[in-house]
Amino acid sequence: TPPPTTGTRDPGLTWLQPDAITFGAWLTATQLNATAKVPGTFVYSPPAGSRLDVGSRTLNVIFTPADSANFKTVEAWVTIVVNKRVPVITWPQPDPIRWGDSMLISTQLNATADIDGTFRYEPPPLTRLDPGSHVLSVTFTPRRSEWFTQATATVNITVNPRETQIVWSNPASIPYGT
């Protein structure tokens, strides 16, 4: 329903479309920042402190001028875009492993995220890597894909060569010149 009007003059309500926000952010004065040329009261819907779902959302304001005898109450709308949030992946640098003795297991493939979801590692678990430096990567798929995007992370791992053990018994003595 439109707001009631008592005065006849326009109070000069202005409200520019706000920048996009990320899912989980609260609406603040940064987004709810309409202005008028005369003093009065702004009532926003949804109000400050609200969290919005992902997508394009409509914000509304009703401005009631303090001098309602001369200025009319007006209403405005803007659209705000709420983007999906990128999950935060934490993955500590793994210690070096020794070639031939170790496969990639949960000790190395131990990334975590700040939300629920699944991890897909490359190379996959139980892979044996050749000696040298390798990049491990993970793709995280959030359980709630309507609010969060996929995320990726990488770490480096060193595979040390196996130390070769040479067994050599003391040879028997031989005469000089042999």
Image (cartoon, helix red, strand yellow):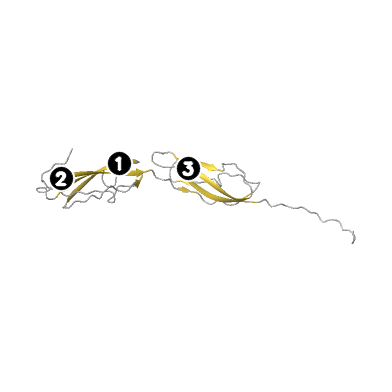
Residue 75 shows which numbered tag? none
Q: Earlier in the sequence, mark 1 or mark 2?
A: 1
Residue 140 shows which numbered tag? 3
Residue 73 shows which numbered tag? 2
Where is residue 25 shown, x and y percent of the image?
34, 47
Where is residue 33 shown, x and y percent of the image?
25, 50
Callout 2 amino acid: Thr
Number of residues whose C-alpha sits closer than 10 Å to that of mark 2, classed few (under 14), some (14–19) or many (20 or more): many
Q: Secondary structure at mark 1?
A: strand
Name the residue beneath numbered marker 1. Answer: 57
Q: Earlier in the sequence, mark 3 or mark 1?
A: 1
Residue drawn 48% across the image and 45% down it: 152
Where is residue 53 shown, x and y percent of the image?
33, 41
Q: Secondary structure at mark 3?
A: strand
Q: Nearer the viewer, mark 3 or mark 1?
A: 1
Which corner quadrant of the image does residue 143 belong to? Answer: top left
Query: Which quadrant of the figure contains the N terminus?
Result: top left
Q: Earlier in the sequence, mark 2 or mark 3?
A: 2
Callout 3 amino acid: Phe
Callout 1 amino acid: Arg
Residue drawn 57% across the image and 50% down it: 157
Q: Check contact, mark 2 vs mark 3: CB within 8 A.
A: no
